Amino acid sequence: MQESFFDHAKRGLDPAKLGDQPKYKQPEFDAEGELVYSVEECHFLVNEVISRLGRIRVKGEITQVAPRGGATYITLRDAGGKDFVINCLIFQSQVGRFLHLLEVGLEVVVAGRAELYKNGRFSLKIDEIRPSGEGAWKKEFEALKKKLAAKGWFEEAIKRPIPMFVKKIGLITSESGEAIHDFTKNIGKYGFQIFLYDVWVEGEKAEKSIVEALHWFSKNMVDLDVLVLIRGGGSPESLVVFHSEKIAEAIRASRIPVITGIGHEKDESIADYVADKRLSTPTAVAVFLRTQREDLMRTVDMLWENMKEKVEGLVVEQRLSIHSRARELQLSMERVVEANRFSISQMAEKLHRGFGKVFESFASLRGRLIRLRYDYEKYVYTSLANVEKAASILSSLNPENVLQRGYSIAHNAQGKILKSIDQIQLNEEVAVRLWKGGFFSRVTRKTL
């Protein structure tokens, strides 16, 4: 027998008392005799059921706090780390009692009454909040942080230095996010070459796409000076991908130094701790790179000014010498004129030619100064590039770096490095050196 709307009333849910419904209408049935509710009736019925729950307590992790109008809205995520969430609100008159607990990432127990609104939004009206330990994501973050710290991944000693002269940048971020606009707006026009790898920065696809970007740059563009991983601000759960151990491993495995700028200044992530340089925001990364270039240019300008001062001193000295000689020439000419008035015209012509050569000398000296500045700037930039290139070559030739990538060196009993199987005999003892430590091995079989 089909259950009617009135049958619900028999079980204690009186249709005439559902919410503030002004008038109860006759029940409606479909062709199969099934009771059909209107949307309004369904809302009233659900709210009647919910109201019988009374005041309930819910434990969860605060993921968002948003004051708006006459209330503060809170989002609670399931304390077990699942994706279930409940929207809650606290009326402004009660917010002051719980301000110290309205912290994103904090696990709390809230108490209040639930309600389904006309727009279909379910909410819990809170009248009590109490703490309940750390938030689930915070616990996971701290556990991974402790694990990677034990591996030594946060140590400054293993972090790669950022080149003094950065020109080529691999940028890893979403091409549609705010972070890329903040970065490009603040980096300045200094001739940077920026290569973008578009990635997801939150959601299920984010971890894989970021790891792929780091690996791709390390494999295909090793001539880059630096990789930049950035993401704008957001709620803690939107930044949770940057707590990934896989992303941390990809950063450490990168052949290119990595700079991060994730979220706001107060945000922290595992990616930040592992990166070779951590900055607070995407804008801060851009300002760092721009300032680095500006500092270099100021150094070049200072060297140029010092050189110019020295050259100008020489010019002044030569000018005084020229004036002195010109005066001597003038006095000599006056004596000659007095001695031989008939040669005045010839001597005046020679004097004119002499001053012409002096002015030509000044013009030539000015041209040489201009060429000298150009050659000096070219020399400084070429020297900086050669130093970076030499440092990179020396680093690649360092045997310690070869051992660090998993290779080893074998010695015979006399300490000679073994390069061929013909240098050892069966049962002979061989010493093998690794990046960290070494061991002895005895030859039981040889292969070509």
Image (cartoon, grey):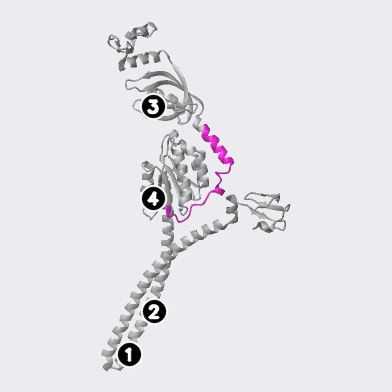
Name the front one of labels 2 and 3.
3
Q: Which mark is residue 321?
A: 2
Image side of residue 162 versus residue 2, left or right: right
What quarter of the picture does the N terminus occupy?
A: top left
Give the residue type that dot 2 points to.
Answer: Ser
Q: Is residue 338 magenta?
A: no
Q: Secondary structure at mark 3?
A: strand
Task: Tell me how far mark 1 sits from mark 4, CA to CA.
Answer: 69 Å
Q: Position of residue 311 (x, y in %)?
A: 41, 71
Q: Which mark is residue 187?
A: 4
Few, some or many residues within 10 Å of mark 3 (<14, 14–19, 20+)? many
Q: Is residue 268 visible?
A: no
Image: 83 above or below 441: above
Q: Is residue 432 visible?
A: yes
Residue at the image point whose x is 42% and y is 27% from the top: 75
Task: Tell me how far mark 2 sits from mark 3, CA to CA.
Answer: 84 Å
Give the residue type that dot 3 points to.
Answer: Tyr
Image side of residue 411 versus residue 164, left or right: right
Highlighted magenta segment, given as a residue range: 139-168
Q: Secondary structure at mark 2?
A: helix
Task: Tell me how far mark 3 sits from mark 1, CA to CA.
Answer: 103 Å
Q: Which mark is residue 73?
A: 3
